[in-house]
Amino acid sequence: MKKSTKKLTQQVALTEILEIATEALWSNKLRTGLTMLGVIIGIGSVISITSIGQGIQDNVKQQIQALGTDVLQVSPGAARSGNVSQGAGSLSTLTWEDAEAIAKEAPSAKVVSATLQRQAQVVYGGTNINTTIYGTDLNYPDARNVYPQFGRYFNEEELNESAQVAVIAPTVQQKLFGNETGLNEKIRIRGEIYRVIGVTEPKGASGPTDRDDAIFIPLTTMSARIVGNNALTGVSVSAIIIKSENQDALNAARFQVTNLLRLRHNITKPDDDDFRIINQADLINAFSNIVGIMTVLVVAIAGISLVVGGIGIANIMLVSVVERTREIGIRKALGATNSAILTQFLAEAIAISTLGGTIGASSGVAIAFVASVMFKFPFVVSGWSIVIGFGLATGVGLIAGVIPARNAAKLDPITALRSD
């Protein structure tokens, strides 16, 4: 009976302490709000930055995975003027014949496709758009998982004859033909007429990149009519796409392709390579590492805001102790224990930081959502970031409130009652 009575008394005392702490904070709303500001900024920054970082990371992963993680892309090397690099792809060192040689002589290369890419104006009726034109061979659909949903892809005869036929992606279809498929319609690409023979399946848009804003035409047509320049040894291409059986075979494919191209291009030193081989899976890992490092750095900076917020809470609570010295004296004279005074001021500090953490977390989630809508990447809010945010907020309040609370608890009641 005595134990239950004691427990009830403790509960009543704790409830009373919380009520007093709430009343004290509410009576100084402006000061309480300004004190919470550092915590709000800190927690909001932590949650919004981690969420935005994860969203961007997922966005890039989706784009790369849509192209396939079992894929290698071979790009031309960089031309040099003196000691200055002109940038990757500035040399016309890759040819369609290179792609055909890889398909024949590299056992780990399951699918090989050569592509030639340019931006061009496309006209249908009174509609004029700018889009990406891809000159491709017959293996491109399998290499990039791009298949027609209406109509068909061009065939070997059309490729050999440099036929003026086009397969359009859904965004181009929508811009040019609206709700119609556009099949068998005539469009103009750089002033020349092409017949639409197919519409590809939608691949989706991720961020600023719309994978459905494209037109595919035979590689021979692209080289002869749009680009108009061939390499000395064959048809120049922008890239060679190599798809292996699985990710485990990528390293073998890279080794085989590297050696084959060096032989074909008469390269004896690795530093003289006139091509680059990019592994899609490596791109995901590299980007994930970069985003992870940047997120840690920004979160660390946001942590400084939490430290500043903690200092602000400590300062305000110290001022509050001085302002309420007489109140503390009266409470102790009426029987309040040191632990009750200590608990009250700790409760106030933790309440400030927790409320600030709640507002900060809500603001962070809202900022992340708005950013995801504006820049079109996945909206991701991880539970661990919110848990860590609230944990940091409570910890800041607890640490910042210890010294002021101890000072208040140690006040002599007689001295406190004499203060003005």
Image: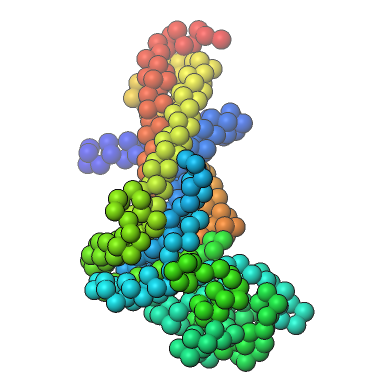
Q: Is residue 188 visible?
A: yes
| Position above or below: 16 against 51 | above
Comparing 341 with 353, the one in front is 353
Q: Which residue is pictured at 57% across the width and 83% down the height? A: 166
Comparing 214 with 207, the one in front is 214
| Position above or below: 22 against 59 | above
Q: Horizontal placement of 41 versus 286: left or right?
A: right
x, y percent for residue 245: 26, 74
x, y percent for residue 389: 41, 43
x, y percent for residue 75: 42, 61
Quadrant, the C terminus: top right
Q: Which residue is pictured at 52% across the width and 87% down the height? A: 161
Give the image quarter of residue 26.
top right
Comparing 384 with 266, the one in front is 266
Residue lying at the far right in this picture: please name it. Answer: 126
Give the image quarter of residue 95.
bottom left
Q: Is residue 284 visible?
A: no
Comparing 228 with 135, the one in front is 228
Q: Horizontal placement of 144 versus 281: left or right?
A: right
Give the image quarter of residue 215.
bottom right
Q: Which residue is pictured at 23% across the width and 68% down the height? A: 249
Q: Which residue is pictured at 43% across the width and 9% down the height? A: 414
| Position above or below: 326 against 356 | above
x, y percent for residue 84: 50, 42
| Position above or below: 400 against 180 | above
